[in-house]
């Protein structure tokens, strides 16, 4: 099997004379997770559309765009889903603008 486009946060692969496995862009994107090999850290990007009015529908849409197959964002997703439950408890309709308190939150 011929390895290609192998990426590592260490320099040992790029210094190898046996084969050329080097592939080190600034960011590697796989399954919604962004890995930065130089910093050796993961990051996630979630696009929030601030132009539209904030409704329960818009909040749900934004929360469901978060794809986290490894569960690294579990605490953040849980907090967002608790916020959605709060919208249900105050009987917020799908297309009504959020009340001021919830909008600030």
Image (cartoon, rainbow, N blue to C red):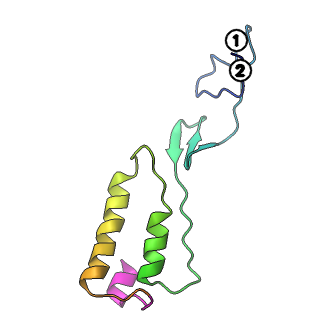
Give the percent coordinates (x, y) of residue 11: 63, 21
Indicate the quadrant containing the C terminus: top left, top right, bottom left or bottom right: bottom left
**Residue pointed to by mark 1:** 16
Residue 100 forms part of the magenta stretch: yes
Q: Is residue 72 magenta?
A: no
Judging depth in this view, the residue of 30 and 40 nearest the camera is 30
Is 41 placed left or right of 99 in the picture? Answer: right
Q: Which residue is mark 2?
A: 21
The picture places residue 7, in percent across and down from the top left corner, at 64, 28
For residue 99, the mark is none
Callout 1 crowding tier (Cα within 10 Å): few <14, some 14–19, many ≥20? few
> Label 1 vs label 2: CA separation?
8 Å
In this picture, residue 94 sits left or right of residue 1: left
Q: Is residue 10 above or below residue 78?
A: above
Secondary structure, mark 2, is loop
Q: Earlier in the sequence, mark 1 or mark 2?
A: 1
Over which residues does the magenta segment extend? 95-105
In this rendered view, identify the residue nearer to me: 19 or 69. 69
* Residue 58 image position (x, y, % from top left): 48, 78
Residue at screen point 70% across, 11% down: 16
Q: Answer whether labels 1 and 2 touch (C-beta < 8 Å).
A: yes
């Amino acid at each position: 099997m011929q390895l290609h486009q192998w990426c590592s946060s260490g320099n040992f692969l790029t210094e190898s004379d046996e084969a050329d496995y080097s592939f080190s862009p600034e960011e590697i994107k796989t399954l919604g997770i962004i890995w930065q090999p130089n910093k050796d850290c993961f990051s996630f990007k979630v696009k929030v559309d601030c132009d539209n009015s904030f409704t329960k529908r818009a909040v749900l849409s934004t929360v469901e765009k978060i794809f986290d197959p490894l569960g690294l964002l579990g605490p953040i997703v849980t907090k967002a889903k608790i916020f959605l439950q709060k919208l249900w408890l105050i009987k917020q309709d799908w297309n009504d603008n959020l009340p001021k308190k919830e909008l600030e939150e």
